Amino acid sequence: AGGFGSKSLYSVGGCKKISVAGRGGGFYGAGSVFGVPANLGFGYGAFPAGGIHEVSVNQSLLKPLNLEIDPNIQRIRKEEKEQIKTLNNKFASFIDKVRFLEQQNKVLETKWGLLQEQGLKTVRNNLEPLFEGYINNLRAQLNSLLSDKGRLEGELVNTQYLVEDFKKK
């Protein structure tokens, strides 16, 4: 049964690697050193008479690989982060507006309740359409803001998905 064997030698002063490979049957067989046929002993390569031949090393293969991330992906990620920050700021602003409008609505409802309790029908008859119009206007603004909030939440989720997708790539 034939087998394959290999050895690697490293020079003490650097990173130059010398590989020896061989193929043999049992303990003895034929093999090669640097592509030159050589006798093998006990399954490993032996150097031919005359010592080790000079080896040429391709220096470009010894340089470290440049495995940096594509600058376009980095730029896209930075832009996405900025977009997320902008969307978060807009979202926070809309939330603040909604809270403010909800507080105004409660104040107006309280005032409206007080006016109704006082029983001032003449004042109420004159103010009722104004307050109802104002409250309806506030409700319309609130509905618009809630709609924007939902849309922005969807955009935020989509942007976060894209960021995660780019991170995986």
Image (cartoon, helix red, strand yellow):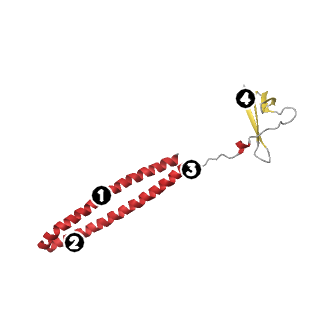
Mark earlier in primary sequence (4, 3): 4
Q: Give the distance between the C-alpha atoms of the residues marked 4 and 1, in whole angstroms.
A: 77 Å
Task: Nearest to the eye among marks 1 and 3: give it.
Answer: 3
Disc 3 target residue = 71
Task: Nearest to the eye among marks 1 and 2: give it.
Answer: 1
Q: Residue at x 39, y 60 (%)?
A: 90
Q: Is residue 104 left or right of residue 91?
A: left
Question: Mark on residue 73?
Answer: none
Q: Give the distance between the C-alpha atoms of the residues marked 2 and 4, in whole angstroms.
A: 96 Å
Q: What's the residue type where badge 2 is placed?
A: Lys
Q: Give the distance between the C-alpha atoms of the residues marked 4 and 3, in whole angstroms.
A: 47 Å
Q: Say what secondary structure mark 4 lies in.
A: strand
Task: Nearest to the eye among marks 4 and 1: give it.
Answer: 1
Q: Say what secondary structure mark 3 lies in.
A: helix
Q: What's the residue type where badge 1 is placed?
A: Ser
Q: Is the C-beta separation of discs 4 and 3 under 8 Å?
A: no
**Residue 98 at what x, y percent from top left?**
32, 63
Q: Say what secondary structure mark 2 lies in.
A: helix
Mark earlier in primary sequence (2, 4): 4
**Residue 168 at what x, y percent from top left?**
52, 46
Task: Nearest to the eye among marks 2 and 4: give it.
Answer: 2
Q: Say what secondary structure mark 1 lies in.
A: helix
Mark earlier in primary sequence (4, 1): 4
Disc 1 target residue = 144
Disc 2 target residue = 111
Does residue 18 sit above or below 82 in this rendering? above
Q: Residue at x 74, y 43 (%)?
A: 59
Q: Is residue 10 left or right of residue 169?
A: right
**Residue 147 at what x, y percent from top left?**
31, 55
Q: Residue at x 41, y 53 (%)?
A: 156
Disc 4 target residue = 3
